[in-house]
Image (spheres, grey):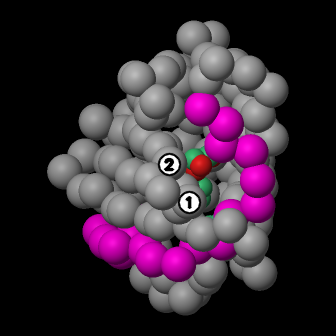
Amino acid sequence: MPVDFSGTWNLVSNDNFEGYMVALGIDFATRKIAKMLKPQKVIKQDGDSFHIHTTSTFRDYSLQFKIGEEFEEDNKGLDNRKCKSLVTWENDKLVCVQSGEKKNRGWTHWLEGDDLHLELRCENQVCKQVFKRA
Ligand code: ECB
């Protein structure tokens, strides 16, 4: 049985989101707004099938995928670049590789205690987010 990430999660910390957004080429005005946000994630997991909805007062982002099945991701409302994304299990971690124009792009989710962790990577920047159950 895989780990179950299902639930509603509220952001409690967000380290180097600025560096991550700069690496993605997000403009100054958008970054100023984005870094004030406290997004919520709603994760629905059925085995290896996932829906991850990230919502905020500014923009929302929705992603659906199955483990091991590559898909086209459009990053709409984020940096709007398209990439090919693939999510796999690495032990109990959910690892996404986002292949495209940006090098070393991807993210990793894992559970630690009752917290949800997310590392977002782009080029040489790493953003670390922690969420607590709502
Ligand atoms: C959707 C809430 C954040 C909106 C920020 C708006 C503008 C900033 C533009 C680009 C910044 C890049 C990413 C924003 C950070 C988090 C959004 C979702 C990141 C993500 O891909 O989460 C994965 C893993 O949970 C599922 O899509």
Q: Residue at x 76, y 66 (%)?
A: 55
Front one among 128 and 90: 90
Residue 25 drawn above or below residue 27: above
The residues bearing labels 2 and 1 have C-alpha atoms spaced at a distance of 7 Å
The residue where tag 1 is placed is 114
Q: Which mark is residue 50?
A: none
Provide the secondary structure element on which disc 2 rests: strand
Q: Position of residue 10 (x, y in %)?
A: 66, 72
Q: Residues within 10 Å of mark 1 (few under 14, many from 20)?
A: few
Q: Residue 123 vs residue 70: left or right?
A: left
Q: Which residue is mark 2?
A: 111
Q: Nearer the viewer, residue 121 or 68?
A: 68
**Residue 103, percent from left and from top:** 28, 36
From where the camera sits, is residue 29 visible? no
Q: Report the image quarter containing ligand 1.
A: bottom right
Depth check, front residue: 76 or 17: 17
Q: How many marks?
A: 2
Q: Position of residue 24 (x, y in %)?
A: 40, 56
Q: Is residue 121 magenta?
A: no
Q: Amino acid at mark 1?
A: Asp
In terms of image quadrants, where is residue 129?
A: bottom left
State the extent of the magenta-drawn residues as a range. Answer: 3-22
Residue type for callout 2: Leu
Give the structural element (helix, strand or loop) at label 1: loop
Tell me where residue 101 appears, x and y as whole percent: 38, 34
Q: Does mark 1 have its CB less than 8 Å from ligand 1?
A: no
Label pair 2/1, CB-CB below 8 angstroms: yes
Task: State the residue at coordinates (48%, 57%).
Answer: 113
